[in-house]
Amino acid sequence: MAATKTIELGTRDRLVRTASRLMQHGGYENSPIKQIVRDAGATLGSLYHFFPGGKQELAVAAIHFGDEEFAEMLAAGLATREDPAEAVEAVTGLLAEALEASDWLDGCPVTATALETLGRLPDVQEACGRAFAHWQGLVAAKLRAGGLPEDEAADLAVTVVNTLEGAEMTAQVSRSRTPLLLAGRHLSRLVASYGPGTTGPR
Amino acid sequence: MAATKTIELGTRDRLVRTASRLMQHGGYENSPIKQIVRDAGATLGSLYHFFPGGKQELAVAAIHFGDEEFAEMLAAGLATREDPAEAVEAVTGLLAEALEASDWLDGCPVTATALETLGRLPDVQEACGRAFAHWQGLVAAKLRAGGLPEDEAADLAVTVVNTLEGAEMTAQVSRSRTPLLLAGRHLSRLVASYGPGTTGPR
DNA sequence: CCAGCACTAGAACGAACGCTCTATCCAGAG
DNA sequence: CTCTGGATAGAGCGTTCGTTCTAGTGCTGG
């Protein structure tokens, strides 16, 4: 029946999910098509049926999937606190927890691929750019809701996301949550320095 | 005539420099040894003579080279201003200029390789970790010289470097210096919020 | 009942990968 | 001069890459 649609994913979705997870770990070149197919329980025939554009087209879909997935976590973290400064710090805690739980492998689903495909695979690079912009938009909305002016919120959101990216990477390399927790503390301080006191008088 | 020693590099140095530049652009997997050898004007025989450990050993040397090279630029930028907050902002300007001049390709010489080799090539990962720690040390020293307490300087330096890394990557993906300039503005504000006013009166 | 089509399946291909191997070059020591 | 060992040189190995190709399966409308 179609009732199991939400549980038993179709071949196409399994390919995208698997590709996203593999690319999150090791990037584009470290995610060979045959391993994606094997891990997804699919075959080469299926892959080229759904993605005639081959690996590059699959990668674009995988980046988009990682984009949405990360956005959900970001939105969830931001929603846990009303005050934007506290909310950003809460996000770093979430990221640190998820990262350590994956033995420091499940970092940003986009960064590795983005750096690897710069100037080589324009379609993939563009998808990565859209992901970053998407996340910046979520943070900016939270900052605006906290009382920051339109333009300052947008600018600050760029730096917030960039700092999260950098801290996540350093946390992976050093296998420590410290960089993320420090990012939380400092970003919180920075965001608070913009707000009118805080969100409101208590 | 050994006088040309400083200009005409030996084969080993040319291999390391070339590998570093290629890995800076596209990471480890996008830098095949045959291209490294060709670009460096060397041969496979020479490569395996100087680096019996093969590509991985060369990569470690290349990361170390990139580490030192980036450290020089960082130190130079930090030295242009006495006030740490202004100095950090000056660094972002330098980075943005160099990045745009290279058509957004010469980003951090370590990041791409670091993310690509996580959990795969421990030696390379460790070299990347040393590079980050090195740069954090340089920033921390500048912050201490500006009057920040020992521990706060060390913590803040971690975030400063992470934000620079994230902003550099986003600048590459979006082909815009804006992320770096925003990072400069925000980091400057953050650093200044710690200092006793500034470095001194005047 | 079967024709048509979306999908599955994996063998096979040429190119490129990292690396090994043998041969050669050449400066300096004896 | 010969001898020797560091350095150079690149053909070729086995493997794996992304992709193509043909064959087969199973559901669906007529």
Image (cartoon, coloured by chain):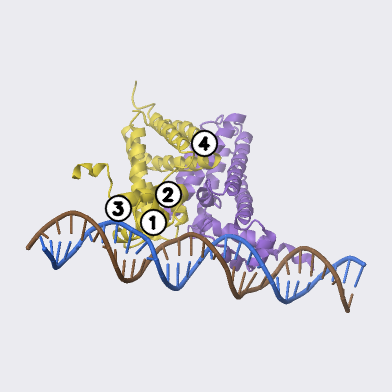
Chain colours: A yellow, B purple, C blue, D brown
Closer to the chain start, of discs 4 and 1, is: 1
Chain letter behind tag 4: A
Mark 1 falls within which chain?
A: A
| Whole-percent x, y for residue B151 in the image | 59, 29
Q: Does B1 appear above or below B24?
A: below
Chain of the residue where label 2 is placed in the rendered structure:
A
User: What residue is shown at x 37% (from left), y 26% (from top)?
Assistant: A198
Q: Which residue is mark 4?
A: A179
Categorize mark 1 by other alpha carbons within 10 Å: few (<14), some (14-19), many (20+).
many
**Dot 4 crowding, Cα within 10 Å, few <14, some 14–19, many 20+:** many
Q: Amino acid at mark 1?
A: Val
Name the kind of residue labelled 4 in the image. Pro
Chain-order first, disc 3 or disc 2 = 3
Nearest to viewer (mark 4 / mark 2) = 2
Residue A40 at x, y = what percent?
36, 50
Amino acid identity at mark 3: Arg
Graded by Cα atoms within 10 Å as few (under 14), some (14 to 19) or many (20 or more), the crowding at tag 3 reads some
Disc 1 on helix, strand or loop?
Answer: helix
Q: Secondary structure at mark 3?
A: helix
Q: Vertically, is A118 above or below B202?
A: below
Q: What's the mark number on residue A22?
A: 2
Q: Position of residue A137 (x, y in %)?
A: 34, 43
Q: Is residue A184 left or right of residue D22?
A: right
Chain bearing mark 3 = A
Residue A183's tag is: none
Please determine whether, in this image, residue A199 is positioned above or below residue A11.
above
A170 or B50, which lies in front? B50
Mark 2–mark 1 Cα distance, whole angstroms, equals 15 Å
Residue drawn where x is 68% and y is 64% of the image: B11
Tell me, yes or no, if residue A110 can be seen here.
Answer: no
Q: Secondary structure at mark 2?
A: helix
Q: Please tell me the numbered disc located at residue A12.
A: 3
